Image (cartoon, rainbow, N blue to C red):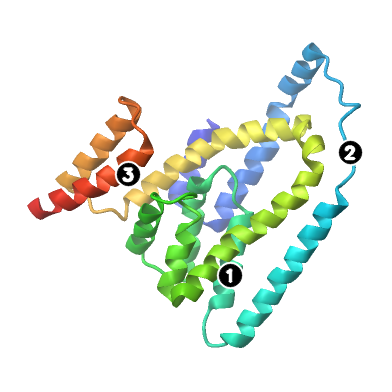
Amino acid sequence: IMAITAAGILIFFGNFYTTLAVVIVSALAGAFIFRSLYVKKDLLENKDYSRVKEGTNSKNWLIAGGLILVFIVIVLLLDQVFPDFQLRDLLVTFSQLSVTLFGGGYVMIPMMQDVLVNDYAWVTGKEFADGIAMGQVTPGPIMISAAFIGYKLGGITGAFVATLGMFAPTAILMIIASSFLDKIGNSIHVQAATRSIKVVAVGMIFAAAILLGGDVDINWVTGLIFTGSLLAVLVLKASVLAVIPLAGIAGWLLSGFL
């Protein structure tokens, strides 16, 4: 029910705020619905958290603080050096997108599409789909598409700024969160909330596939590649690393028959 509801919401009402709301509501619902399961599990396993380390790592906080200052300085410098171009907006926008990410990059597609295509019109729907497709041959395929969009807007500088905005804030958050890792990892409420969010993420990824499909040319060639790729992954258990380049080659070879 959670997965289907999340998919329906994003398909028909998907934007930055609804995506964020779906994650938050699912986390709260999970903490309420699944909490009793983890309470019973802890009682059965007789877990003792008395030895779990508490407190924080001051070194992590110093590193995070230093990175935050560097990030702020970069924002201010961009505003001074490039006053007539939206590099600062590029950095801030991708930073906002990155810190709201949960459940993997594919969950982020509806949010990115709404902000980058509908709100700012930095790219068209087809260009956005192309960026996502090109990113499939790189590590971190969805998030690295920020470099593609940044390059289109501002060349190498734009690609660097967009990539920095996508990865720097989450890196800082990870450094800070590592100070609380033991405590957070053993929290019954966090485990229950995460269980719910993981289920909802499946529905959100399905919605992302539907939304991306709307910007893809549908014909017998793309239908054949789609079906072949699906069978290769699900039935033949082929590696995605092989399927993606082979799909690209097939598209190139068969495009002449259209």
Q: Is residue 66 above or below residue 227?
A: below
Q: Residue at x 66, y 45 (%)?
A: 24
> From mark 1 to mark 2, how far is it between C-alphas?
35 Å
| Figure label count | 3
What residue did someone put label 1 on? 91
Q: Observer-nearest residue: 248 or 20? A: 248
Instruction: Residue at 59% x, 50% y: name it.
Output: 101
What is the distance, in whole Å, between disc 2 and disc 3 at their CAs?
45 Å
**Dot 1 surroundings within 10 Å: few (below 14), some, or many (20 or more)?**
many
Give the structural element (helix, strand or loop) at label 2.
Answer: loop
Q: Residue shown at 90%/28% (left/top)? A: 51
Contact (Cβ within 8 Å) of mark 1 with mark 2? no
Secondary structure of the residue carrying tag 1 is helix
Picture coordinates of residue 39, whole percent (x, y): 78, 21
Q: Is residue 245 left or right of residue 255?
A: right
Residue nearest the observer in this picture, 248 or 227: 248
**What residue does disc 3 label?**
244
Cα–Cα gap, marks 3 and 1: 30 Å
Q: Does residue 167 show up?
A: yes
Q: From this view, report whether residue 231 is shown above or below residue 154.
A: above
Contact? badges 2 and 3 (CB < 8 Å): no
User: Residue 25 location in percent, x, y?
Assistant: 65, 42
Q: Amino acid at mark 3?
A: Ile
Q: Which amino acid, mark 1? A: Leu
In the picture, measured across the screen, residue 19 lies left or right of residue 127, that is right
The residue most toward the top is 44
Give residue 16's quadrant in the image.
Answer: bottom right
Q: Which residue is mark 2?
A: 54
Towards the viewer: 189 or 148 = 148
Establish if 108 lies above or below 131: above
Q: Residues within 10 Å of mark 3 (few under 14, many from 20)?
A: some
Provide the secondary structure element on which disc 3 rests. helix
